[in-house]
Image (cartoon, rainbow, N blue to C red):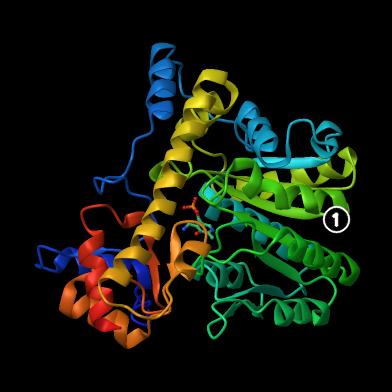
């Protein structure tokens, strides 16, 4: 039966981790991952999470099945965070939200639903994008193309080309957009640029699918979510996937959501019934723990404050590492202007290093980043940053 099964290619990023683990270099640094580490190089366990868990254990409940669309209080809390509890869209019941297995799960439920709804539609993702976007939408049966995004020469976004591609896309095309903290480049659109993108999407009849995996890691929870308000104002239908993997440091609990903004409550009810069908036939219903924790934190004022403070600590530390890296590169003798690193947002930086330079970083210094030049600045800390800066200076 399995004689014809081919070996699938290794996941490029997880493969890098395996290589890192096998490297005997005592100074090695892993900047390949998409994870936030604290200044001690440790994955944080947030206080808000342990406090919420303590409360949950004290009021221990039996573990029945959850509803197909997850914990109602969780879905409501997600809507409040993403769209604003007071927003007309939420108040009028025209947003359908389901709990999902992380942000990836939210994307996949949306992709499967869209494939049934508009089987002929094409999908456009940014060039470059999170490496799983293409595979995920292709696996759902879509043909996936790209719209221009990163401009290496200009160290930023080729916005004119992006807009032109959207204006030329076939009506009905699904456009996957990074709501904030673009992975892998770190370059985000300005509110004025978003306005133009929204105008293009609306006038062309495209379907926006916003991937929000890093809310709070750029400028703040409200600032990073502001783009959602811009889309709401335009009155367009839209999809939003949410991930709490990073913002709650709950990677392994798989906590996320999918929200679909419809034009009426009656429409949202029908959409919800179809999202539930996708979930039921894939994994029946979601797990309890992570969503319970996130719901408790988001809806308990004291815990919510603790979370916002802890998220701010992570955000500020990332910014400090960006600034420190630029300083240390200068101190290590790099003469070219590296200040673009501080303009990027979120946990990643497109460093501008070539594939050869990234490979030298690995083989000569044990500094692991992705061949595209992407490094995770959230894995830098006050102990490894000197070493990393000197290594980068040597390969430059
Ligand atoms: N979208 C983007 C842009 C991401 O970077 C990630 C995580 N690396 C995800 C979605 C998936 O998040 P999760 O781990 O919650 O599935």
Vertical relation: 65 (above or below) 119: above
Query: Which residue is tagged 1?
Result: 236
Residue drawn at the location 69% of the way across and 62% of the way down: 190
Where is residue 288 shown, x and y percent of the image? 49, 31
- Residue 117, image quadrant: bottom right
Q: Secondary structure at mark 1?
A: loop
Answer left or right for 367 relative to 379.
Answer: left
User: On screen, 165 above or below 220?
Assistant: below
Q: Is the residue 327 above or below the residue 260 in the image?
A: below
What is the x, y in percent for residue 326? 37, 66
Q: Tell how many labels.
A: 1
Quadrant of the frame with the C terminus: bottom left
Give the position of the N terminus as an image quadrant. Answer: bottom left
On the picture, is 341 further left or further right than 82? left
Q: Of residues 141 and 382, which is closer to you in this image?
A: 382
Q: Name the residue at 87% across, 68% down.
A: 205
Badge 1: how crowded within 10 Å, few (<14), some, or many (20+)? many
Residue furthest to the top: 59
Residue 144 position, x and y percent, is 64, 77
Q: Can residue 81 be seen in this snapshot? A: yes
- Residue 227 pos. (x, y %): 72, 53
Q: Residue at x 79, y 79 (%)?
A: 169
For ligand 1, tell me if the residue under mark 1 lies within 8 Å: no
The answer to whether residue 11 is visible is: no
Residue at the image position 42 percent from the left and 44 percent from the top: 314
Q: Is 21 positioned to the left or the right of 264 in the image?
A: left
């Amino acid at each position: 039966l399995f004689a014809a099964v081919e070996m699938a290619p290794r996941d490029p990023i997880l493969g890098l981790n395996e290589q890192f683990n096998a490297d005997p270099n005592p100074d090695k640094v892993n900047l390949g991952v998409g994870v936030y580490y604290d200044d001690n190089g440790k994955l944080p366990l947030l206080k808000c999470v342990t406090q919420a868990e303590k409360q949950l254990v004290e009021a221990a409940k039996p573990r029945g099945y959850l509803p197909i669309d997850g914990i109602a209080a969780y879905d409501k809390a997600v809507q409040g965070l993403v769209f604003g509890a007071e927003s007309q869209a939420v108040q009028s019941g025209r947003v359908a939200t389901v709990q999902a297995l992380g942000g990836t799960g939210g994307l996949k439920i949306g992709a499967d639903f869209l494939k049934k709804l508009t089987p002929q539609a094409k999908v456009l993702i940014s060039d470059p994008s999170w490496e799983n976007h293409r595979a995920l939408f292709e696996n759902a049966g879509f043909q996936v193309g790209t719209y221009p995004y990163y401009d290496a020469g200009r160290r930023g976004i080729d916005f004119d080309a992006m807009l032109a591609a959207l204006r030329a896309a076939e009506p009905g095309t699904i456009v996957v957009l990074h709501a904030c903290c673009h992975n892998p480049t770190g370059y985000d659109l300005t509110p004025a640029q978003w306005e133009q993108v929204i105008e293009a999407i609306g006038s062309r009849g495209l379907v926006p699918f916003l991937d929000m995996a890093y809310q709070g890691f750029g400028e703040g929870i409200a600032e990073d979510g502001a783009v959602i308000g811009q889309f709401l104002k335009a009155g367009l239908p839209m999809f939003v996937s949410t991930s709490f993997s990073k913002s709650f440091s709950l990677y392994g609990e798989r906590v996320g959501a999918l929200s679909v903004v419809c034009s009426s409550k009656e429409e949202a009810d029908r959409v919800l019934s179809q999202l539930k069908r996708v979930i039921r036939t894939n994994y029946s219903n979601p797990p309890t723990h992570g969503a319970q924790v996130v719901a408790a934190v988001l809806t308990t004022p004291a815990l919510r404050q603790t979370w916002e403070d802890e998220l701010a600590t992570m955000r500020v530390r990332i910014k400090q590492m960006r600034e420190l890296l630029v300083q240390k590169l200068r101190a290590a003798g790099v003469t070219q202007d590296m200040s673009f690193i501080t303009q990027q947002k979120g946990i990643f930086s497109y460093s501008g290093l070539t594939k050869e330079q990234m490979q030298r970083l690995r083989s000569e210094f044990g500094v692991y980043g992705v061949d595209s030049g992407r490094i995770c600045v959230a894995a830098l800390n006050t102990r490894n940053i000197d070493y990393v800066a000197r290594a980068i200076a040597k390969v430059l």
